[in-house]
Amino acid sequence: MDPRVLPPHLRRQNRKPRDSIMGITRPTIRSLTATYISRLARRGGVIRMKQEIYDEVRTVVRSRLEVVLKQVVLILDSSTTHKRNRKVVTSRDVSPYHAPPRKYRYGSK
């Protein structure tokens, strides 16, 4: 059946393309993520934090996540992966023990 003939409430809605990292920076869940950030900081031994640190942590998390995802995509696209056509990322792909060594790290050759 042609979707143009259907009433608007029965038509399939297209999803708007958006940045997938928006869940970290969206203001509606800012208090939720601030809680997570403060919990991580408490676990690391931090006692007090300024309000400006939360936005800085979000930008650092975003940049680190982009680097990790680029490396994972390179690993999955490489010819040394035994099942080259897989689309699921496993924990072994992200784990630093199983992943190929990164450049510019202390002790790297």
Image (cartoon, helix red, strand yellow):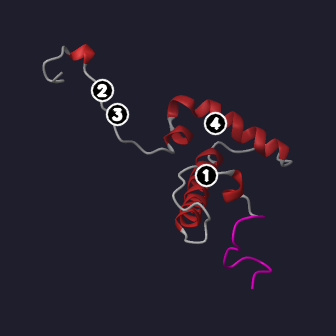
Q: Amino acid at mark 2?
A: Gln
Q: Nearer the viewer, residue 60 or 16?
A: 16
Q: Is residue 91 above or below residue 31?
A: below
Q: The residue tagged with tag 4: helix, strand or loop? A: helix
CA gap, disc 4 and disc 2: 29 Å
Can residue 13 be seen here? The reply is yes
Where residue 73 sits in the image (x, y, percent)? 54, 61
Labels 1, 2: front one? 1
What residue is at 59 percent from the left and 48 percent from the top?
Answer: 58
Pointers 1 and 4 in contact (C-beta within 8 Å)? no
Q: Are marks 2 and 3 in contact (CB under 8 Å)?
A: yes
Q: What is the distance, in whole Å, between disc 4 and disc 3 at their CAs?
A: 24 Å
Q: Are marks 4 and 3 in contact (CB under 8 Å)?
A: no
In the image, which disc is placed on residue 15? 3
* Mark closer to the chain start, 1 or 4: 4
* Majority SS type along the magenta span: loop
> Picture coordinates of residue 69 (x, y %)?
56, 58
Q: Are marks 4 and 2 in contact (CB under 8 Å)?
A: no
**Which numbered circle lies on residue 35?**
none
Seen at 83% across and 49% down, the residue is 44
For marks 2 and 3, give the CA distance.
6 Å
Give the Cα distance between marks 1 and 2. Answer: 28 Å
Label number found at residue 89: 1
Per the image, the residue denoted by label 2 is: 13
| Boundaries of the magenta span | 97-109
